[in-house]
Image: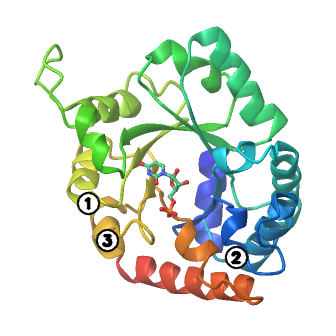
């Protein structure tokens, strides 16, 4: 099954466009696990088990594992998600971008080592830095387009004057992902929930690619405006929330609190369709 088919399947089965982001910070774990980086797997597996029937996808952010030398726990978590929630696609948030030969290694890491269904990529180095990922049939790749952080303005909203029509850089990325770069329908775009007007613009330029939309929850993005701007029957949107769900409670009932927050967020998103 391809990544897009998995997304559509999970969207329907779980009536959801919510993605739970797995950004484990041991310093924020509940008392029994607090500060212990050997418990990253245990913490994340509890969150996965508590929310697997509520999500369109899970999104582990690789830096939260690598910074604790916990790649082995990420491998174990990927295997757990595959076993416990086989219908839920996993997007590895790695934001890779490098020359082709190195990109081949990153693609192998994402799809073979970790078994991810999709990966996030920076398009900054051009098509030959993306191509190695597209060789993995059925896997997905989300290109950074209009990111959720304020610094996104530094480049992404600048005019690209050498291209016909003088598009903004993020509009140009959207156009490439909708058309010439999207050889086998594997590409999607990352657009921040903190910029709903730009989500709407991206949807005009790229009407049929899936959008990964981080920024609701801890970053304060507007969930309702996000759905109004980006949701389409025929092109999934994947709205990510990480910290607001993971750390909904710092008590022993953290997994139950995470489920309650995921249920609430899913409800807000669905009601805005
Ligand atoms: O534009 C972007 C791209 C990626 N992210 C990632 O999403 C989550 C957001 O976490 P919250 O706790 O919900 O704020 C995190 O992993 C980022 O690296 C993003 O925020 N914005």
Q: Tell which circle, 3 or 1, labels the residue nearer the N-terminal end.
A: 1
Give above or below for 157 relative to 214: above
Crowdedness of circle 3 by 10 Å Cα count: few (<14), some, many (20+)?
A: some
Ligand 1 is within 8 Å of the C-beta of the residue at disc 3: no
Q: Which dot marks residue 196?
A: 1
- Residue at screen point 61% across, 25% down: 134
| Observer-nearest of 14 and 65 | 65
- Residue at screen point 87% across, 58% down: 38
Q: Which dot marks residue 265?
A: none
Residue 15 makes an appearance in the image: no
Residue for badge 2: 51
Residue 101: image quadrant is top right
Q: Quote the CA–CA distance across marks 3 and 2.
A: 22 Å
Q: Cβ–Cβ below 8 Å for labels 3 and 1?
A: yes
Q: Which dot marks residue 222?
A: 3
Q: How far from the left and from the top, in percent, is residue 62?
A: 67, 45
Say what secondary structure mark 2 lies in.
helix
Crowdedness of circle 1 by 10 Å Cα count: few (<14), some, many (20+)?
A: many
In the drawing, does residue 223 fall left or right of residue 264? left
């Amino acid at each position: 099954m391809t990544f897009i088919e998995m997304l559509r399947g999970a969207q329907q089965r779980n009536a959801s466009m919510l993605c739970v982001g797995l950004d484990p910070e041991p310093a924020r774990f509940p008392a029994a696990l607090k500060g212990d980086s050997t418990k990253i797997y245990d913490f994340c597996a509890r969150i996965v088990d508590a929310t697997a029937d509520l999500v369109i996808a899970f999104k582990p952010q690789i830096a939260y594992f690598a910074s604790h030398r916990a790649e082995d726990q990420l491998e174990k978590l990927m295997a757990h998600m595959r076993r416990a929630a086989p219908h839920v696609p996993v997007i590895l948030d790695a934001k890779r971008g490098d020359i082709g030969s190195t990109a081949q290694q990153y693609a192998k890491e994402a799809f073979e080592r970790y078994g991810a269904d999709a990966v996030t990529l920076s398009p900054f180095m051009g098509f030959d830095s993306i191509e190695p990922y597209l060789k993995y049939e059925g896997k997905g790749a989300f290109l950074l387009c209009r990111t959720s952080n304020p610094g996104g303005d530094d480049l992404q909203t600048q005019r690209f004057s050498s291209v016909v029509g003088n598009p903004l850089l993020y509009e140009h990325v959207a156009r490439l992902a909708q058309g010439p770069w999207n050889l086998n329908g594997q590409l999607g775009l990352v657009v921040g929930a903190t910029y709903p007007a730009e989500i709407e613009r991206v949807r005009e330029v790229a009407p049929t690619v899936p959008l990964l939309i981080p920024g609701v929850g801890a970053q304060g993005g507007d969930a309702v405006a996000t759905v109004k701007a980006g949701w389409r029957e025929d092109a999934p949107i994947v709205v990510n929330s990480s910290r607001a769900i993971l750390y909904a409670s710092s008590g022993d009932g953290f997994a139950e609190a995470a489920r309650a927050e995921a249920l609430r967020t899913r409800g807000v998103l669905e009601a805005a369709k």
